[in-house]
């Protein structure tokens, strides 16, 4: 804890009036700051050679109405120092008299450019005005929306569920009829766009190469991109609000549906966060199986990325789409054998796994690995030296390393810029430190480098799976802590205590201690983070998700400038976005 | 339906049928779905198009990027309030005759997302022909929906009226 002490000491020595409190909960260092010092402190945290918190991982806010804390709103900044491998969380309470429409917080967009979209998200969903933000507009909700959904006095919404299937019921009267007007409205052009001298074209939200419902407003001079602005939110599903109305355990199925190509990785990141909050230890067997599942899912995600990316960039490689999807089916079959699900798996539970692996599981994984390695060589040969592929991806979308960090990029995109940040290596979780693997990096930082990094990552994933499956330890597959996981069925017949535990867990759920934690894991797309605030009840008070795709997509504008319109498709593919996670 | 005079199908002879039946027969085996992936269900829709499940066996493999070339919209995923006008616009851009499959729980009834952001069923925006339950439905379920839709198309009685 030497490093975290330094942060607080350095901060107190430099700004004695700024710090309101320093606390440590579950090894997270939390510093509460006065609002007027935020920008000075932020700049110092970033630039001081002893601290160097160069990566703003996450920015969110908490509405503390029901916690009874004044002031009601507070912004939260999760910082990470890549050179020092240290994290700190800043909490900035925002004094607000309630007479203005929303509380005011100074913007940090000029210190960490990644704050741009993150602050817009907070403005949109919680309603905090960021002073000095260049273009504070709604980002996820439609522009004509009224209210801020993540405020605690805003209802969850939705409709009452009617369980009788009666067709005469007025609830079904609308079937087959258009009852919503679904009016569209003109939206404002982003700042700096010059429609007089340049052509502004609209790509999406329905476009075969945007990998979902992404809309890009591209400003063109001839065929050259002057700027490319993303309009996201077309798949905003209210994950955070839903999570704040359900018990911790009940949110796991929702994480599958966020980044629906990496359900297992999302499960893992979420259960790790809840386990951190609860302070639960997970048995070694469960950790190994989690690693196997997460790495299989990483392979699945990268295969799907390869399939669609190659298909978008050069339509002639349609066969690769078919090959990759064929291999992904093998992974999905293994998942199905394990938990019954293909895409939305819910394979893990807090405290371990939902069930132990079936006896045929190890053999199926070994068969898959054998097949995959053989075929992977073919895919590598199809693309890596393919002249069309190289011409369309080499030198496209350069992102300087310092630019990438400032924009908060994580995952393969950051590693393609030469920065070997991989949480599996630098902050090993779920016993990743038991396995030998490398973190592939590149220095060119273009689309081709990102492709190479992902291809090498697939090889490393296969290596990890092989080690884990060969050294799979025996023992229980979930923790023995009866306060967190259900007792095994046979125990219910003999032990009254087990019956009580079962009853309490099913009816009430577990209640973590009050506090807040930030948990993260290395997803195929980058760092997936969960910020949980517990008020001591069985339902999370605040649940915030840092979607790596959301943050990475922000770099599209920087990367696209100066390239041709056709390169935009290559760029969108090389970011590897999943809109379910961008919009959450 | 199509039968030669000697009772064997395929032989040259006199064909007795109605125009509707021939046209419906042609329509049902040449559905052109729109490349319109919304959320998780789109992954299973793509899997249905991949070799293992092979949607081409049912004549519905020509996924088109433009709604103007499609006659089948597979709403594969949750429809948010921001997306609602877009879905409606896309449906209106498709030429007649056109059909809609609501794939998955979200597009059928809202699914697990009973909240402020999601339209509780795409049938509030556009008329739906076949609902596919599942979260997400397996590719086989989507293929079943296409077969069901083909049966529905074959039953259509009068040409010219808007489907």
Image (cartoon, rainbow, N blue to C red):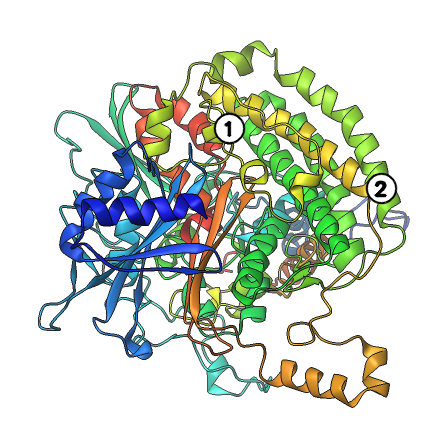
Q: Quadrant of residue A124?
A: bottom left
Q: Nearer the viewer, residue A121 or A405?
A: A405
- Where is mark 2, residue-wise? B10
Report x, y in % for residue A536: 46, 77
Q: In the image as oriented, which residue stretches furthest toward the bottom?
A: A496
- Where is mark 1, residue-wise? A420
Q: Nearer the viewer, residue B101 or A70?
A: A70
Mark 1: secondary structure = loop
Residue beneath the point at 73% across and 20% down:
A378
10 Å crowding of disc 1: few (<14), some (14-19), many (20+): many
Chain of the residue on which disc 1 is drawn: A
Q: Pick the quarter of the image with the C terminus of chain A.
A: bottom left
Report x, y in % for residue A562: 29, 19
| A46 on left or right of A2 | left
Q: Quadrant of residue B146?
A: bottom right
Report x, y in % for residue A229: 29, 37
Chain of the residue on which disc 2 is drawn: B
Q: Nearer the viewer, residue A205 or A107?
A: A107
Q: Which mark is residue B59?
A: none
10 Å crowding of disc 2: few (<14), some (14-19), many (20+): few
C-alpha gap between disc 2 and disc 1: 66 Å
A81 to A12, vertically: above or below: above
| B9 on left or right of A580 | right
Residue beneath the point at 36% across and 56% down:
A30
Residue beneath the point at 58% across and 85% down:
A163
């Amino acid at each position: 804890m030497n490093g975290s002490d330094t942060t607080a000491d350095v901060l107190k020595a430099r700004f004695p009036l700024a710090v309101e409190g320093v606390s440590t909960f579950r090894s997270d260092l939390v510093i509460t700051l006065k609002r007027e010092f935020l920008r000075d402190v932020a700049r110092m945290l970033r630039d001081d050679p002893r601290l160097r918190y160069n990566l703003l991982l996450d920015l969110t806010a908490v509405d503390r109405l029901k916690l009874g804390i004044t002031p009601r709103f507070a912004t939260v900044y999760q910082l990470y120092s890549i050179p020092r491998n240290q994290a700190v969380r800043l909490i900035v309470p925002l004094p607000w008299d309630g007479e203005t429409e929303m509380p005011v917080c100074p913007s940090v967009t000029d210190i960490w450019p990644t704050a741009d979209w993150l602050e817009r998200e907070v403005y949109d969903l919680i309603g905090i005005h960021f002073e000095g933000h260049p273009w504070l507009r709604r980002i996820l909700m439609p522009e004509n929306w009224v209210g801020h959904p993540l405020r605690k006095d805003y209802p969850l919404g939705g409709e009452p569920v009617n369980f009788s299937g009666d067709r005469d019921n007025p609830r079904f009267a609308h079937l087959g009829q258009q009852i919503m007007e679904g009016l569209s409205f003109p939206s404002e052009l982003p700042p700096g766009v010059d429609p007089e001298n340049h052509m502004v074209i609209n790509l999406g939200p329905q476009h075969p190469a945007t990998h979902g419902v992404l809309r890009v407003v591209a400003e063109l001079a001839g065929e050259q991109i002057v700027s490319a602005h993303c309009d996201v939110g077309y798949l905003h599903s209210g994950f955070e609000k839903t999570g704040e109305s359900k018990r911790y355990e009940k949110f796991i199925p929702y994480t599958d549906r966020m980044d629906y190509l990496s359900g297992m990785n999302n499960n893992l990141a979420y259960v790790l966060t809840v386990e951190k909050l609860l302070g639960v230890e997970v048995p070694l067997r469960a950790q190994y199986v989690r690693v196997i599942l997460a790495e299989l899912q990483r392979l699945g995600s990268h295969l799907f990325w390869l399939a669609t990316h190659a298909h978008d960039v050069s339509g002639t490689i349609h066969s690769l789409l078919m090959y990759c999807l064929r291999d992904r089916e093998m992974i999905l079959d293994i998942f199905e054998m394990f938990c019954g699900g293909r895409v939305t798996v819910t394979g893990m539970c807090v405290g371990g796994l939902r069930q132990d692996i079936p006896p045929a599981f190890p053999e199926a994984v070994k068969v898959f690995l054998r097949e995959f390695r053989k075929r992977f060589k073919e895919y590598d040969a199809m693309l890596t030296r393919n002249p069309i592929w190289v011409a369309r991806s080499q030198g496209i979308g350069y992102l300087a390393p310092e630019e990438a960090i400032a924009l908060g990029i994580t995952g393969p995109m950051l590693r393609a810029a030469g920065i070997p940040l991989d949480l599996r290596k630098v902050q090993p979780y779920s016993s990743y430190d038991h396995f030998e693997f490398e973190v592939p990096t590149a220095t060119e930082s273009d689309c081709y480098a990102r492709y190479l990094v992902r291809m090498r990552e697939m090889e490393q994933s296969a290596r990890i799976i092989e080690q884990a499956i060969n050294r799979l330890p025996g023992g229980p597959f979930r923790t023995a802590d009866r306060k967190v996981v259900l007792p095994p069925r046979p125990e219910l017949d003999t032990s009254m205590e087990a019956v009580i535990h079962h009853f309490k867990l099913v009816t009430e759920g577990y209640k973590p201690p009050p506090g807040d934690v930030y948990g993260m894991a290395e997803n195929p797309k980058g760092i997936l983070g969960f910020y949980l605030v517990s008020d001591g009840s069985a339902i999370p008070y605040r649940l915030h998700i840092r979607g790596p795709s959301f943050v990475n997509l922000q770099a599209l504008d920087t990367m696209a400038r100066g390239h041709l319109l056709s390169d935009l498709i290559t760029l969108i593919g090389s970011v590897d976005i999943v809109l379910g996670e961008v919009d959450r | 339906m199509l039968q030669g005079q000697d009772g064997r199908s395929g032989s040259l002879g006199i064909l007795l049928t109605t125009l509707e039946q021939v046209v419906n027969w042609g329509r049902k085996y040449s559905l052109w779905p729109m490349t319109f992936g919304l959320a998780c269900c789109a992954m299973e829709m793509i899997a249905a198009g991949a070799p293992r499940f092979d949607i081409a066996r049912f004549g519905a493999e020509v996924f088109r990027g433009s709604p103007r070339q499609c006659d089948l919209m597979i709403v594969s995923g949750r429809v948010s309030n921001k997306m609602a006008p877009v879905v409606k616009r896309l449906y209106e851009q498709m030429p007649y005759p056109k059909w809609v499959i609501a794939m998955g729980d979200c597009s059928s009834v809202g699914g697990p997302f009973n909240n402020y952001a999601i339209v509780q069923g795409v049938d509030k925006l556009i008329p739906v022909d076949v609902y596919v339950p599942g979260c997400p439905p397996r590719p086989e379920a989507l293929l079943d929906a296409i077969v069901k839709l083909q049966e529905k198309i074959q039953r259509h009685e009068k040409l010219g009226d808007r489907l």
